Image: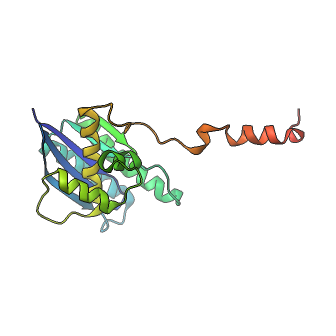
Amino acid sequence: MKTRILGVDPGSRVTGYAILDCQTNTFVSPCCDTLSLTDIADPHERLLRLYSFFSELINSYKPDYCSIETPVYGKDPAAMLKLGRAQAAIIMATLHADVPLHEYYPKAVKKAITGNGNANKDQVAYMLGKMISLPENRLTNDATDALAVAWCHHQKISDPSLTNTHEQPRSKSRNRKNSWASFVDNHPDRIRT
């Protein structure tokens, strides 16, 4: 039985998307590209375009699942807000089409493909090229990232025990007391009651 997965690497100006068809041990990507919104100045118009584009893409390809990469950090809060809005527009198009949606963190995606959560983009692209029959055109990093997200979901549904791709990455502070509790313990003289 064939499973079709839509993978998305969201961006406020350039978004990668890929369709991954999985059947037994055969993997084909009939569609792997980017949507560029750099020519649209109005951020609200870009969100509408994202929603419309992904609604049409889902209607055309009818994926069984949608997997989307979740950003985890950024240096610029305004850029992270724009990225979150772009992701939300894509999520709404997916939910509106009643397609099951799954989110994956970047390290989990890289680990699912290369076995290393810190792999670089070239390593990810190389491994994808070895595992999946790709379109003839040269893929951009954003398109490759989207295909990687789709592959990550394929691995999860094939054998959930192989990876923990759905879990949030652990922050260093989870293994010790949070910074406020540590501060209070180290400075009891500063506590006023």
Q: Quadrant of the C terminus?
A: top right
Question: For residue 137, which quarter of the picture?
Answer: bottom left
The residue closer to the viewer here, 83 or 126, is 126
Residue 132 seen from this side: yes
User: What is the tally of numbered marks visible in this picture?
Assistant: 0
| Residue drawn 37% across the image and 43% down it | 104
Residue pushed farthest bottom?
39
| Residue drawn 37% across the image and 62% down it | 42
With respect to residue 47, does 160 lie above or below?
above
| Residue drawn 52% across the image and 60% down it | 76
| Residue 181 placement (x, y as % from top left) | 73, 37
With respect to residue 130, does 182 lie above or below?
above
Q: Is residue 27 left or right of residue 163?
A: left
Residue 15 seen from this side: no
| Residue 189 placement (x, y as % from top left) | 90, 40
| Residue drawn 67% across the image and 39% down it | 178
Q: Is residue 191 left or right of residue 109?
A: right
Q: Is residue 117 left or right of residue 18?
A: right
Question: For residue 65, which quarter of the picture?
Answer: top left
The residue closer to the viewer here, 116 or 8, is 116
| Residue 87 placement (x, y as % from top left) | 36, 48
Q: Quadrant of the N terminus?
A: top left
| Residue 96 placement (x, y as % from top left) | 26, 36
The residue closer to the viewer here, 72 or 126, is 126
